[in-house]
Image: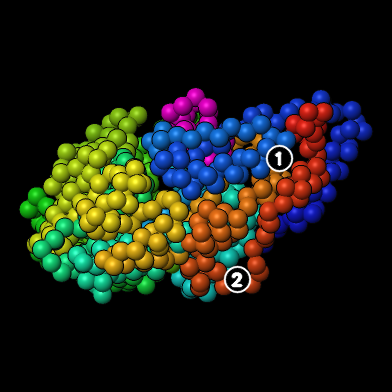
Amino acid sequence: MQFRLNPRVILALVLVTTVLGMSLGAVSAQERVPTITVHSVTQAERPIEYETTRLVVENMRELGLDVEHRALSLLQFFDETWFSREEGKGRVEKPFQMTAWRMVGRPERSEPDEFTYNLFHSSVRDGGYNFIGYYNPEYDALAETQRALTDPAERREIICEAQQVIRNDMVNAYFLHPQTPQLVNTDVFNAASVVIQAGIGIQNFWNWINIEPIGEERLIITATTSNLNVLNPLEIAGDSPSRVTEIVWDRLMRTNPDGLPEPWAAESVVWEDSTHVVLTLREGMTWHDGLPVTSADAAYSFEAALAGTTQVDAEGNEFFRAEATDYYPFVSGITDIEIIDDLTIRLSLAAPNGAFETSTLSKLNLIPKHIWEPIITELLADDGADVDSIQEEIPIGSGPFKFVAYDVNEFALLEAHTDHWSAPKADGWLMNVLPNLEAMIGQIQSGEMNLLWEWPSDPAVLSDIAEANDHLSLFTETSIGFQYFAFNLRYAPFDNLAFRQAIAHVIPQQFIIDNLYNGFAAPADSFVSTALGYWRECDEPLRTYEFTIEGARALLESAGYSWDDEGRLLYPAN
């Protein structure tokens, strides 16, 4: 049986506790809420995210807060947020407090398990996606339960409840799902061959292999505003690197354009029962270095993602340290990997997992054992290293594109793997790192670039360009990804529910959509996108946090906060 306190009851308890504290003389002098730092990337890299953060920071100051907006280059931004979540454990001395963040629309995220479990389950607070440090045993139970259900209607009921808990706890302040405009040069590509994936757009695997050149130009030329960081099949390094890894490394299954899993490198996927699945690889697959892809490689792909060591923390408690922290949560339910023959393996699960085909088989990259086994063995012998430190000189996969050359700060150049059973129609694929947006606009209009999938500035600009250039076609799709502000729940003031809810009230959601995104976005109130209609068919609507400075101040006051003579916000007395 589950119990949940009504928020009004919680508020009453807070008020009663405050009154009792005063009457018993237990109240110390109230302290000012210290300076809060809100992180974002720079204006040059992501103008809309920067302006959104600046706007919210100004509104936070209306609450009597001293707020610093810290805009950083993307790599430094990750260092000060993702890699600095706890005091003494990050790449910088001071943990982050609040940051503008986004989750992009990857294909496997059309299944809600990845966000439901991996954004918030307490097991992934240290090195996984739960970088905000959320811990709620009730939520953990919901995340675990939905994984064990195979009936979609039953799973939806639990996922609806999980959305309610996260919305009420206000651990992340969601405000929109971007509807990103994207341009294709239809003098170079057959417009009818462009593949749009539900909740993703044109920057998807199926489009990369199916888009059809119609003239002498045979190379897909695109760009990103971000550095490629690391191109590693066991590391999820961000949106742009993911576009590379998804076409260089094969997966046993893939999420199709309708958002459903289907066999890919596995020719067949047969469930013997709810916890045992047999996977048979396609015949004739080869790695880019010419060696055959075998069941030993497939088995090792899971073993590498499961690899780790038992370590001891400062208090003497043992804990498991995964080498591939980004992928471990997706394979942790596997209890046994059996090689049946050269092309077939059997996986055994600890419990039924209704999301396994999408969240694991459609997500994990197949890696060559002959390359990665020595690497993982060496990492396991080094307590301080993990897989995100590895960058192959020329990465080897088995996917439809293979590496020619790259520089993570400049470009990635791939060519078609013509021996692949589903070889791409284009001869190659080039992604340039191009942080200058004016240069990006100039290149798509001049023809130096022929496909623009990433545009972090005013969406109306691309709409106008498409109207003015007959050779450019505009494509739009509401993303299953989302924009939000993330709070570090480990530390004050963001460890306080009323404070987080007050911040949610100063985010002018509709103004941001109408004026900064020019309408190219949908409102967000959950980690499950409105583009995933089935998983949003819940009995109860989610709590709303309308934009109101006055309401935010009233909420703080009712929770025991007050203001000094200079208008600065003070913590509750006790």
| Residue 550, horizontal then vertical, whole percent | 77, 48
Q: Would you name the residue on which mark 2 appears?
A: 538
Q: Residue drawn at (52%, 66%), measured in percent from left and top?
A: 530
- Please tell me how crowded label 1 is: few (under 14), some (14-19), or many (20+) other residues with Cα within 10 Å: some
Which element type, helix, strand or loop, lies under badge 1?
loop
Q: Amino acid at mark 2?
A: Cys
Q: Nearer the viewer, residue 269 or 177?
A: 177
Instruction: Point out the stretch of residues depicted in magenta.
Output: 78-101
Q: Amino acid at mark 1?
A: Glu
- In the image, is residue 93 part of the stretch drawn in magenta? yes
Q: Residue drawn at (84%, 43%), measured in percent from left and top?
A: 15
Identify the disc placed on residue 479. Answer: none
Which element type, helix, strand or loop, lies under badge 2?
loop
- Please tell me how crowded label 2 is: few (under 14), some (14-19), or many (20+) other residues with Cα within 10 Å: some
In this rendering, would 221 be left or right of 42? left
Q: Is residue 136 above or below residue 424?
A: above
| Residue 543, horizontal then vertical, whole percent | 67, 60
| Residue 168, horizontal then vertical, whole percent | 66, 55
Q: Residue drawn at (64%, 72%), measured in percent from left and top?
A: 539
- In the image, is residue 252 part of the stretch drawn in magenta? no
Q: Would you name the residue on which mark 1 appears?
A: 62
- Which residue appears farthest toward the front when viewing the image? 468
Q: Is residue 160 above or below residue 101?
A: below
Q: Is residue 3 above or below residue 86?
A: below
Quadrant for residue 311, please give it: top left
In this rendering, would 8 be left or right of 134? right
Give the Cα distance between marks 1 and 2: 35 Å
Q: Quadrant of the N terminus?
A: bottom right
- The answer to whether residue 162 of the structure is visible from this angle is no
